[in-house]
Image (tube, helix red, strand yellow):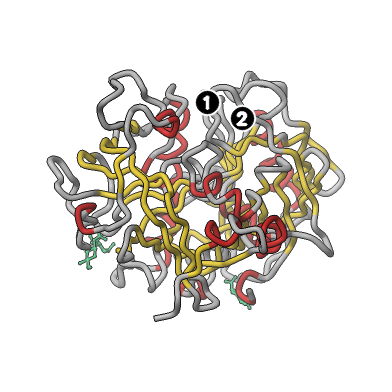
Amino acid sequence: MAPIFSILFLISTAVFSATTARDYGFTVELIHRDSTKSPMYNSSETHYDRIANALRRSINRNKAVLTSDTAEAPIYNNGGEYLVEISIGTPPFSILAVADTGSDVIWTQCEPCSNCYQQSAPMFDPSKSATYKNVPCSSPVCSYSGDGSSCSDDSECLYSIAYGDKSHSDGNLAVDTVTMQSTSGRPVAFPRTVIGCGHDNAGTFNANVSGIVGLGRGPASLVTQLGPATGGKFSYCLMPIGNASMEDSTKLNFGSNADVSGSGAVSTPIYTSDQYKTFYSLKLEAVSVGDNKFDFPEVSSKLGGEANIIIDSGTTLTYLPSDLMSNFGSAIADSINLPRAEDPSQFLDYCFSTTTDDYEVPSVTMHFEGADVPLQRENMFIRLSEDTICLAFGAFSDDNIFIYGNIAQSNFLVGYDIKNLAVSFQPADCNAM
Ligand SMILES: *[C@@H]1O[C@H](CO)[C@@H](O)[C@H](O)[C@H]1NC(C)=O
Ligand SMILES: *[C@@H]1O[C@H](CO)[C@@H](O)[C@H](O)[C@H]1NC(C)=O
Ligand SMILES: *[C@@H]1O[C@H](CO)[C@@H](O)[C@H](O)[C@H]1NC(C)=O
């Protein structure tokens, strides 16, 4: 086995100091839940079953975001579309977890488990890890749990996450080494990473995942905790949902590997929402179809301030305010040369008949603040049956939080920089990366 490379150790020594931190980068695999590399892969599903299921999850996740009032983890837990493998402890114990830009804590089910959901893989046993330590209430880190209420000085710090769909995870806040297998073949280890060791977890979790790796903006997220080594940067390049190559994994890059620059790269500010500190909140100013530009309406967004939309890798569709959605959808219908059709899955409003994948689409641009993002066909449409394609955008009547979902992000290198508060987009062929 290759030696474990400890970046935190390196940057704490004088020799490597800040330069190492700036130049340091690594990449891990990001696995789509429906890819053949995923334990959730179901070979009896057709391609169209998978798309319909992804739409259903997307709608449930969006509903959970809308109805949730908790600031800590307002996301539908099982909405995550991508999985990541990490190891916890010494020796490293590998788990497959949902990678979620819409939540913060890194947690896994832990032995002994008084009330755990059924998990097909073996469970992490903290008593077998030489580096595992429960966080005491007296530690400042205990504030990461967002719950200091029942914490007295001489006891262990507990965390409690309630997701928008009423699922929950409760347990010990702890520190342990988190190791990831980089695609270069060298494991990278992060000692003393704050994790949740869940002894009571229930709800709609899938038996084939052992927890959640939060990639949000809160202090307990993987991104924030790796910040000293990676400069708070990560990026991904998601393959189009309809692409057969979805069977391959994609990449999740950190640090210098996550730089997004060069031809076509644009960037837009990240805003901090008082209520939803976890989210990557952006400002979408307008959407244009050909020469028609439709402004994002003044709506009372729960995000508050300038921001009006969150970007999320775990939501499949893009959700817009209903006025904007109807302007956008009608403009597409007027300019695409295809007959209207019904959505066979009944989720989507703007569907068209065609059997070819080589249809013409109007030019569409998402105008984020300071960043015009031109969409390609695969960012706008998904095929729902042999003869039907639908616009992968939706609206809800109770307009609150709008989401820039993963279909719209596919075939872009999407970079997040939580230090400089920017999200960048660069057109890319994610199959080739
Ligand atoms: C989980 O994986 C097992 C095989 O490891 C499989 O039999 C089972 O159907 C999967 N469960 C779900 C919910 O996908
Ligand atoms: C796999 O897909 C088939 C066909 O949609 C479905 O009937 C079955 O329940 C699925 N299995 C699992 C484990 O989800
Ligand atoms: C899938 O990706 C390949 C390689 O980029 C491309 O040639 C092909 O057209 C794509 N298929 C679909 C359905 O988008």
**Residue depicted at 58% across the width and 66% down the height:** 26
- At label 1, the amino acid type is Ser
Residue 12: give x, y in percent of width and height: 58, 55
Residue type marked 2? Ser
Name the residue carrying label 1.
397
- Along the polypeptide, which appears first: circle 2 or circle 1? 2
Which residue appears at 73% of the width and 51% of the height?
Answer: 424
Asked which secondary structure carries label 1, the reply is loop
**x and y percentages locating residue 101 in the rendered image:** 52, 46
Q: Which residue reaches farthest bottom? A: 1
Location of residue 404 by image quarter: top right
Query: Which quadrant, please, contains the C terminus?
Result: bottom right
Q: Residues within 10 Å of mark 1 (few under 14, many from 20)?
A: few
Return the x and y of residue 410 as percentages of the image width and height: 62, 59
Q: Which residue is mark 2?
A: 322
In this rendering, position of residue 285 left or right of residue 72: right
Residue at coordinates 20% horizontally, 39% vertically from top-left? 200
Check whether the beta carbons of the residues at disc 2 and disc 1 lie within 8 A of each other. Answer: yes
Question: 5 above or below 352?
Answer: below
- From this view, report whether residue 38 is shown above or below residue 54: below
Q: Is residue 392 visible?
A: yes
